[in-house]
Image (tube, rainbow, N blue to C red):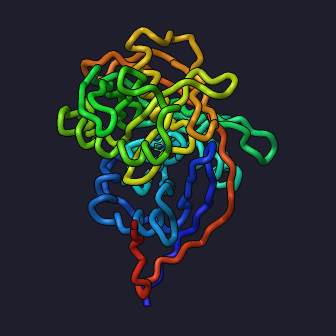
């Protein structure tokens, strides 16, 4: 019998799960986290499926695997794993991972007090944390440069008719659908509607446009669909629901999605650099976004966003992947 053991800390960030693999991850080849992500996808993807899908995970499971730093200035590296694949960057995943590893003493002395510098497939991000004794109260991620890639692309959406959407990058590419003639806003959709319509929207936008990151051609294609609407909670600027993978709606306000949304609004002249942006999720949890500075990605004017949120650890999980188990590689209904 061959049995592999993964030592995990399970957590959630503002409602969305984060399974942090602290030991048991495979050794990866490559000189950057982008190359190592490609190596993982080519040779070790069964681990993602095993830990994310049923019966060890579920449709919305998401997580990370910890690795030593690659860059001389970094504290550690993260690989993101999800039911949807291996993301270049994940905001809620980073907030949950940082909270889990600090609360469990896995980083005793950050290179800079109060912050961790992390190599991730999309580049490098900085996580500033607020600590109260042994508890991490909140984490602010200084994310990769984010930009508006396409505006007013029209597609035919089943049930709604023709709709216009923008595509923006915040660590992943997002199709962003704002209220318009054929879409009354997020409040007009049920979770079932989002799960039914979003895969078709994603397929049609990817058939119509090709987005490729100017600095890394392995980062390409719209993976996430964001429906926007009016805020329902005090203090929120906007509300959103992000669809990803085959069946997932982010329970958090989505870190890379909030970054993409701020880049879109800034490029459209609807969000000033000094204006706070509090994003509300489908369950009412909030991230506080900020435009930290302006940047450029290839030909695109870009922003450097930060997003702040909180996470709570839900338990320690020692997970077995046993060759005798016919469902060792996971399944999806
Ligand atoms: O928070 O960036 C995020 C994210 C991506 C997919 C789910 N959450």
Residue at 32% in and 25% down = 166
State which quarter of the image contains the C terminus. Answer: bottom left
Residue 168 image offset from top left, x and y in percent: 35, 27
For the residue pair 257 and 231, the one nearer the viewer reads as 231
Q: Is residue 166 left or right of residue 186?
A: left
Q: Is residue 154 left or right of residue 85?
A: left
Q: Is 68 rendered above or below residue 159?
A: below
Residue at 56% in and 10% down = 274
Residue 205 image offset from top left, x and y in percent: 24, 35
**Which corner quadrant of the image does residue 329 belong to?**
bottom left
For the residue pair 180 and 14, the one nearer the viewer reads as 180
State which quarter of the image contains the N terminus. Answer: bottom left
Q: Is 263 rendered above or below residue 308?
A: above
Q: Is residue 229 left or right of residue 167?
A: right
Residue 145 visible, this angle:
no
Residue 14 image offset from top left, x and y in percent: 63, 42
Residue at 25% in and 24% down = 153
For the residue pair 313 and 53, the one nearer the viewer reads as 53
**Which corner quadrant of the image does residue 310 belong to?**
top right
Which residue is situated farthest in the front direction here? 159
Q: Is 62 rendered above or below residue 57?
A: above
Residue at 45% in and 39% down = 242
């Amino acid at each position: 019998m061959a049995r592999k053991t993964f030592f995990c800390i399970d957590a959630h960030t503002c409602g969305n799960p984060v399974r942090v693999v602290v030991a048991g991850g495979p050794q990866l080849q490559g000189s950057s986290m982008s190359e190592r992500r490609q190596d993982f996808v080519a040779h070790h993807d069964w681990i993602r499926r095993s830990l994310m899908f049923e019966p060890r995970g579920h449709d919305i499971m998401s997580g990370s695997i910890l690795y030593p730093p690659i860059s001389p200035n970094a504290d550690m590296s993260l690989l993101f794993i999800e039911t949807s694949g291996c993301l270049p960057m994940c905001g809620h995943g980073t907030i949950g991972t940082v909270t889990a590893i600090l609360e469990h003493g896995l980083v005793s002395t950050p290179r800079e007090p109060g912050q961790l510098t992390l190599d991730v497939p999309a580049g490098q991000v900085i996580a500033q944390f607020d600590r109260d004794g042994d508890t991490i109260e909140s984490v602010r991620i200084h994310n990769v440069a984010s930009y508006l890639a396409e505006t007013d692309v029209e597609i035919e959406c089943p049930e709604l008719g023709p709709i216009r959407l923008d595509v923006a990058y915040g660590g992943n590419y997002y199709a962003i659908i704002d209220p318009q003639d054929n879409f009354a806003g997020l409040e007009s959709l049920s979770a079932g509607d989002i799960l039914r319509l979003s895969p078709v929207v994603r397929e049609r936008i990817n058939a119509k446009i090709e987005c490729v990151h100017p600095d890394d051609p392995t980062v390409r294609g719209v993976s996430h669909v964001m429906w926007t609407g009016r805020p329902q909670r005090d203090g929120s600027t906007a509300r959103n629901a992000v669809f990803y993978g085959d069946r997932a709606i982010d329970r958090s306000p989505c870190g890379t999605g909030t970054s993409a949304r701020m880049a879109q609004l800034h490029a459209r002249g609807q969000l000033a650099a000094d204006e706070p942006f509090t994003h509300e999720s489908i369950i009412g949890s909030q991230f506080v976004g900020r435009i930290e500075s302006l940047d450029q990605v290839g030909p695109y004017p870009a922003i450097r966003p930060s997003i702040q949120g909180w996470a709570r650890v839900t338990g320690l999980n020692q997970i077995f992947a046993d060759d005798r188990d016919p469902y060792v590689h996971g399944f999806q209904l």
